[in-house]
Image (cartoon, rainbow, N blue to C red):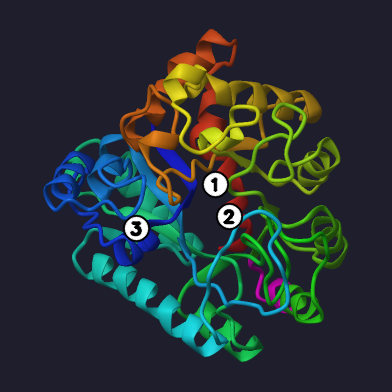
Amino acid sequence: MFTIDAHLDLATNAISLNRDLTLPAGEIRMLEKEMEMNDRPDRGLGTVTLPDLRRGSIGLVIATIISRVAVRGRPVKSISLTGWNSPAQAYAFAQSQLGWYRVMEDQGEMVQITSASGLQRHLDLWFDQSIPVAEKPIGYLLSLEGADSIISLDYLHRYYEQGLRAIGPAHFGPGRYAPGTHSNEGGLTPAGRDLLKEMQSLNMILDMTHLTDTGFFEALDLFGGTIIASHQNCRTVIPGERQFSDDQIKAIIERDGVLGGALDVWMLYPDYKPGQDPKQLGANLEKLIPHFDHICQLAGNSEHIAFGTDLDGLFGREQSPYDLDTIADIQHFQSILKTRGYSDADLEKIFHKNWLRVFRKVL
């Protein structure tokens, strides 16, 4: 089934992790092992590449740029994240990631979606069964995960001209526009408030993922445009500040937003510690379903759940469901969801229709 994944850090993998994503995951794993690359626990364990996206019928994604600024005097509670020492450096690094997307476009591997007509052309292409899947580019909406690299509002407009259509103001730790996960609790900065107002004027998507609870509700009050949570699970199911409370989920639902189910085992298994074996924990793909079920119960329908896997989001198979080899295995959710009582109509919504409803509001 045609599938949309609303959160993949493709450029981070290509540029920061030096992965040639035009190769299948198996080849990249072998290459990293042959080169004895051991700087990260996910070396030789990647799951996301462009061929594997095609193999899994994942023809459209929200693809990110990540570039943060180190903020002095703003401590992080439990993790240490470095960043660039100035917004100018962060912007320059972000442009290198955008450059990779542009080359992928030039090579026919990807196509940027910035308009309703472009979206429809891409859907027509992917639903045309006469064209081999191997010849179809991966469509992407461009998003910033963390807004630190926006030097000023003038640069927001520059980013928009470059195709940016979504922004998550926060990531991990402190930020120029909003604090994020594992930061000391706090709300939007004054610059963050100005950013959201300008985003609304451009009809951009606001990604609420990673905002603190305070920042979430401030953003909800301030921003009247389209909101989503691109890769987000439920605090009621798996406790933790990274997850959303029922009140937050209800707020997304009331604004006709969608939450993308994430497949990081940290978000699927209670009290997960890095290095634990997902198989020994019994952490499989089915662990996402209680989150879907919970959101559907809050909504009274299946119109607000979808996929935002975050696979290879600075982790690999070592921190993914044990029955997932590559992102192509997302198609296993068809049988999993049917077994849990979801209808064919529900599956179409979850796999692509819910995200398309959101995208059409801003394109």
Spatial CA distance of label 2 from label 3 is 28 Å
The residue that label 1 is drawn on is 356
Q: From the image, which quarter does the N terminus lie in?
A: top left
Give me the disc on residue 234: none
**Earlier-in-chain disc, 2 versus 3:** 3
Q: Give SS at disc 2.
A: helix
Give me the disc on residue 360: 2
Q: Amino acid at mark 3?
A: Asn
Q: From the image, which quarter does the C terminus lie in?
A: bottom right
Q: Residues within 10 Å of mark 3 (few under 14, many from 20)?
A: many
Can residue 245 be seen here? The reply is yes
Q: Is residue 241 above or below residue 89?
A: above
The residue that label 3 is drawn on is 13
Residue 209, given in percent of the width and then of the height, sits at 66, 53
Q: Amino acid at mark 2?
A: Arg
**Contact flag, marks 1 and 2 (Cβ < 8 Å):** yes
In this rendering, would 47 be left or right of 315? left
The residue positioned 30% from the left and 61% from the top of the image is: 14
Spatial CA distance of label 1 from label 2 is 6 Å
Range of magenta residues: 198-204
Nearest the viewer among 168 and 212 is 212
**Contact flag, marks 2 and 3 (Cβ < 8 Å):** no
Magenta segment includes 199: yes
The residue positioned 39% from the left and 35% from the top of the image is: 318
Residue 225, given in percent of the width and then of the height, sits at 74, 63
The residue positioned 60% from the left and 67% from the top of the image is: 146
The residue positioned 50% from the left and 81% from the top of the image is: 90
